[in-house]
Amino acid sequence: MDLDQPTVPLPGEVRMPLLGFGTWQATGKAGYDAVLAALDAGYRHIDTATMYGNEEEVGRAVQESGLRREDVFLTTKLPPERVGRERETIEASLRALGTDHVDLWLVHWPPSNPADSIPVWRELLAARDEGLARAVGVSNYSTAQIDELIQATEENPAVNQIPWSPFLYDRQRHIEHRDRGVVLEGYSPFKRSDLSDPVLTRIAGAHGVSPAQVVLRWHIDHEIVVIPKSVTPERIRANADVFQFALTAEEMRDIDALGGT
Ligand SMILES: NC(=O)c1ccc[n+]([C@@H]2O[C@H](COP(=O)([O-])OP(=O)(O)OC[C@H]3O[C@@H](n4cnc5c(N)ncnc54)[C@H](OP(=O)(O)O)[C@@H]3O)[C@@H](O)[C@H]2O)c1
């Protein structure tokens, strides 16, 4: 991947762009158009899932973008009710996406039966070892649930994708991920934020950007992966335009304080 955007290293020489594009609820033609617009706007990381029902549209947009497959980081996710059918699920994802591997495959959320957790994780590791996914991880896992996987297999998830925003900022939880070599990937950066908060509007005003752009830049400066979703072309472009300004250390601290920790 040849990129002028910031990335974070994952095991196996994989580099994950800190800015990605979310696609939940972006389906059909709207989903295809949004992903194509995102790639045109400069995103090089797309987040989808079996559950989103849009892998085909995502795959088609990547193919028709004219970009090389290796220049786009693709994530998809296993619905945990597919326990015992992991292999057929990733094969279906790859067929729909029109590729022979994804860059990251996540367990979408912890299996409802905790006894399934480790067998599912072993299936992900097997898929990685066979080259179907370059890296594997989890989503919506607690630190204790991550520790169980590490204890059983000595393999840490490369990533944990969880809800995150300035208003959910939890320094301790971030440190727990770092200590285990797990990259924190935040989701729902806007839905979990009050974009009219005076701290965000003041900082946005000082830089001539929007509060949404401040929220995204704050994630990136913490080296937390962020995956804003939009189907609106102007927002898709604005959400990618977050590398032209920098937050000061004091602004970072003021935004951190919105999380109350
Ligand atoms: N692992 C999980 O369990 C999980 C759960 C939730 C989400 N995710 C992933 O994370 C991605 C992002 O989260 P999300 O879709 O829940 O929420 P989000 O990205 O926080 O918010 C999306 C909403 O914000 C609007 N929006 C986009 N840009 C904006 C801007 N600049 N200013 C104001 N509003 C803006 C969008 O509207 P328009 O689209 O109408 O422009 C949409 O309504 C998802 O798409 C999905 O890929 C993962």
Image: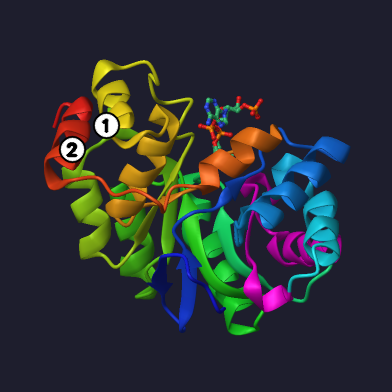
Amino acid type at circle 2 is Glu
Q: Residue at x 26, y 30 (%)?
A: 203
Was residue 86 drawn as part of the magenta stretch in this picture?
A: yes
Does residue 187 appear left or right of residue 57 in this picture?
left
Q: Earlier in the sequence, mark 1 or mark 2?
A: 1
Residue linked to disc 1: 206
Does residue 57 appear left or right of residue 77 in this picture?
right
Q: Residue at x 22, y 38 (%)?
A: 170
Q: Which segment is the magenta one? A: 68-97
Q: Position of residue 49 (x, y in %)?
A: 67, 49
Location of the N terminus (image quadrant): bottom right
Amino acid type at circle 1 is Ala
Location of the C terminus (image quadrant): top left
Is the Cβ of the residue at disc 1 closer than 8 Å to that at disc 2? yes
Q: Residue at x 73, y 76 (%)?
A: 68
* Image: 85 above or below 188: below
